Image (spheres, rainbow, N blue to C red):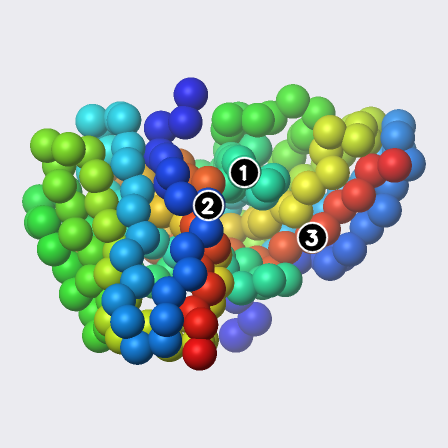
Amino acid sequence: NAGVTQTPKFQVLKTGQSMTLQCAQDMNHEYMSWYRQDPGMGLRLIHYSVGAGITDQGEVPNGYNVSRSTTEDFPLRLLSAAPSQTSVYFCASSYWDRGRRSYGYTFGSGTRLTVV
Amino acid sequence: DQQVKQNSPSLSVQEGRISILNCDYTNSMFDYFLWYKKYPAEGPTFLISISSIKDKNEDGRFTVFLNKSAKHLSLHIVPSQPGDSAVYFCAASGFGNEKLTFGTGTRLTIIP
């Protein structure tokens, strides 16, 4: 059981380039999300999806696109990379935990992106 | 507008002593609170949580306390161990809401 798999682990981009960060989960979770972690800022929500074909914006969506064609995959696209997008990106999937009355999250190991 | 705040960026504690990590929130709609632990080059992992209907939840060495009137929660680790050295994030969500709002994190260092 792999959980949440993110690729690549590291990436360096030039300003203006585009790329896609991949995220796949094998737990059949309906909900998936993308966060970015920056020093002194914690984790901030970029985009999320409550199921295949449904996506919505989070706190910091500008410069990013997402799609959810399958339950398993939730790629994050950078349209035209900017130095401000230098960050560590985490993908997460979650399910409704009836015992805890909350969503249980599993995070991927992250993608460290540098835009020069 | 930081709805979840961790005012201490770092904390150092002697091995065997108690570690206390604090978290404040401003959104009274938050119903559920969680603590995540994060090692370098890894994703956050769930540690412990508490519902707003409780004021304390315990799991082994970890206890979370919630003071709703003060909009404050704290994580106690007793006794602290070297493997507890990590960054700890406080997070909150509304009831039935899939979105988490994270604090800025506290780096805990356990001194042997």
The label shown at residue A72 is none
Residue B77 found in image quarter: bottom left
Identify the residue under disc 3.
A111
| Chain of the residue under the numbered disc 2 shown in the image | B
Identify the residue at horizontal 22%, vertical 28% (top origin). Answer: B29
Identify the residue under disc 2.
B9
Q: Name the spot of residue B46 as percent of width and height, x first.
A: 38, 60
Identify the residue at horizontal 43%, vertical 69% (top origin). Answer: B110
Residue A38, visible in the rendered structure: yes
Residue B47 found in image quarter: bottom left
Q: What element carries label 2?
A: loop
Q: Is residue A93 above or below residue B67?
A: below
**Which is more toward the observer, A89 or B4?**
B4
**Which is more toward the observer, A73 or B61?**
B61
User: Could you tell me the amino acid type at mark 1?
Assistant: Gly
**From mark 3 to mark 2, how far is it between C-alphas?**
23 Å
Q: Is mark 1 on a helix, strand or loop?
A: loop
**Which is more toward the observer, B67 or A113?**
B67
Identify the residue under disc 1.
A40
